[in-house]
Image (cartoon, grey):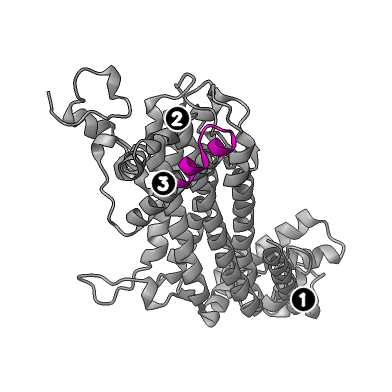
């Protein structure tokens, strides 16, 4: 059996030290030490509350707060000795506090448990992460609005089934991503409300016999509400699952966006150019310019989906209250938050630098009979039933395929062989500009509507 130290925070019950491998296997300090700032924040609030409740003296409170402040400075200066035998961030900080200020340091844990301490730390950390992520979403949306406004009149093919469907404004297309990100923002704001509920005071599982005043710590830590049940407070992780669900949706949107950017930068589409700083080359093919940023974001979406699945699986079989299983909540949650943040940051940097190849897009929109629906609508306005118009235009498209002509390239006589209702004014609706401008309603692709949507988007961002 190993001679490694017994953890003095709970070693009184044990007659021999923990096996060295088991100590490493069960320790979480290697990854939960990133919670140090929030752990110290929670401890300072707890000590402040204990003094006001009469459990600590003012001198003891001040010694604890001063010691914790100095420990945070040590950690941030890279001078802190993280010990695996102390298991986690909480016991490392508490042990160091006792080293610094003596027996008073041992009084800090009065009225709380590591169970409610870690639940509080994670919520404080995730609350801050959500705020940073929300900022990156807004920054990406600002870039989309600027691009949409600049390119409101640039025409590209819109697709369904990745087949040419109807012409759209490039700005309108970009605003589709703005809308998705707006919903992602709303989900995270809503998620934050449930993250921001305080479990501190739940102690191990049943509360505490000390005269704590949870309202004080709630106010000091900026929580919106106090958890109403101690069992739930220490064992619930649905706030982390909810965050990973919202993060998964956001990453799904970024992954779809990435797929389009990958397609658009290919030689086969050639719709846009990404600056070199967001791309890499090939070690063997000198002509290559690979869109690595969107490709990597597309791949990283799987990591966040995995975190969501992992946390759901982690929690599904646990009885109340806290179980050691919950130590496994942190790494997937940390990774999901890091991945979403970094992916948003990469896109927020990259999107303003996208340069559309205007003429290539326009030429692509001219191919594939993208104004076929406009011709059908034209005939409807002449009084024909839509289904008949659909069949008429279908014959015209078949003729175009056979002759290699787009609808706008056909003569009036050629078009009239399909319907005598077609007159010379038809060419106004068969142009790309005519098609795009005709969709002049809220949510439509007309340039005027794109600019109006940009204005609404800027009002939305300003109100946040």
Secondary element under disc 1, as helix, strand or loop, is helix
Query: Residue 395: x percent and y percent?
Result: 66, 62
Residue drawn at x 45%, y 29% as measured from the top left = 113
Quarter of the image for residue 389 reads: bottom right
Query: Which is in the foreground here, disc 3 or disc 1?
Result: 3
Dot 3 or dot 1, earlier in sequence? 3
Whole-angstrom CA distance, mark 3 to mark 1, is 67 Å
Which span of residues is magenta-colored? 49-62
Q: How many marks?
A: 3
* Up-down relation of residue 300 to residue 39 (above or below): below
Secondary element under disc 3, as helix, strand or loop, is helix
- The residue carrying pointer 2 sits among few (fewer than 14), some (14 to 19) or many (20 or more) residues within 10 Å by Cα, namely many
Q: Nearer the viewer, residue 82 or 291?
A: 82
Name the residue beneath numbered marker 2.
Answer: 115
Secondary element under disc 2, as helix, strand or loop, is helix
Q: Nearer the viewer, residue 118 or 55?
A: 55
Image quadrant for the C terminus?
A: bottom right
Query: Which is in the foreground here, disc 1 or disc 2?
Result: 2
Name the residue beneath numbered marker 1.
Answer: 426
Query: Residue 305: x percent and y percent?
Result: 44, 43
Asked if marks 2 and 3 touch (Cβ < 8 Å), the reply is no
């Amino acid at each position: 059996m190993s001679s490694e130290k017994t953890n003095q925070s709970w070693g009184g019950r044990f007659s021999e030290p923990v096996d060295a491998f088991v100590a490493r296997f069960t320790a979480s300090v290697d990854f939960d030490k990133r919670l140090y700032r929030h752990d110290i924040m929670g401890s300072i609030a707890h000590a402040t509350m204990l003094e006001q409740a009469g459990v600590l003296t003012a001198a003891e409170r001040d010694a604890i707060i001063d010691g914790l402040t100095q420990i945070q400075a040590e950690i941030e200066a890279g001078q802190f000795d993280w010990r695996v035998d102390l298991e986690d961030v909480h016991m490392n900080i508490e042990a160091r506090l006792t080293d610094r200020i003596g027996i008073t340091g041992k009084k800090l844990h009065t009225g709380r448990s590591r169970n409610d301490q870690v639940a509080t730390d994670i919520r404080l950390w995730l609350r801050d992460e959500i705020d940073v992520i929300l900022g990156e979403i807004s920054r990406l949306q600002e870039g989309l609005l600027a691009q949409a406004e600049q390119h409101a009149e640039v025409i590209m093919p819109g697709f369904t089934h990745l087949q040419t469907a109807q012409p759209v404004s490039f700005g309108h297309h970009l605003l589709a991503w703005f809308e998705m990100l707006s919903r992602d923002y709303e989900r995270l704001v809503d998620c934050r409300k449930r993250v921001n509920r305080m479990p501190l005071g739940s102690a191990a599982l049943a509360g505490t016999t000390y005269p704590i005043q949870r309202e004080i710590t709630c106010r000091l830590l900026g929580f919106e509400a106090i958890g109403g049940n101690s069992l739930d407070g220490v064992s619930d992780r649905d706030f982390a699952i909810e965050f990973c669900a919202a993060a998964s949706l956001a990453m799904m949107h970024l992954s779809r966006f990435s797929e389009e950017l990958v397609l658009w930068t290919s030689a086969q589409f050639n719709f846009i150019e990404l600056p070199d700083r967001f791309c890499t080359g090939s070690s063997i093919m000198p002509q290559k310019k690979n869109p690595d940023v969107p490709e990597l974001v597309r791949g990283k979406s799987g990591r966040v989906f995995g975190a969501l699945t992992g946390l759901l699986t982690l929690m599904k079989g646990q009885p109340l209250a806290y179980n050691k299983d919950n130590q496994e909540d942190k790494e997937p949650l940390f990774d999901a938050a890091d991945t979403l943040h970094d992916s948003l940051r990469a896109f927020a940097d990259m999107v303003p630098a996208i340069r559309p190849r205007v003429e290539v897009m326009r030429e692509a929109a001219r191919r594939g009979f993208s104004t076929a629906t406009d011709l059908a609508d034209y005939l409807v306005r002449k009084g024909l039933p839509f289904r008949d118009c659909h069949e008429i235009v279908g014959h015209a498209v078949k003729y175009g395929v056979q002759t290699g002509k787009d609808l706008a390239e056909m003569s009036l006589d050629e078009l009239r062989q399909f319907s005598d209702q077609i007159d010379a004014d038809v060419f106004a609706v068969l142009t790309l500009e005519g098609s795009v401008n005709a969709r002049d309603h809220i949510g439509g692709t007309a340039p005027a509507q794109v600019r109006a949507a940009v204005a609404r988007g800027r009002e939305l961002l300003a109100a946040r």
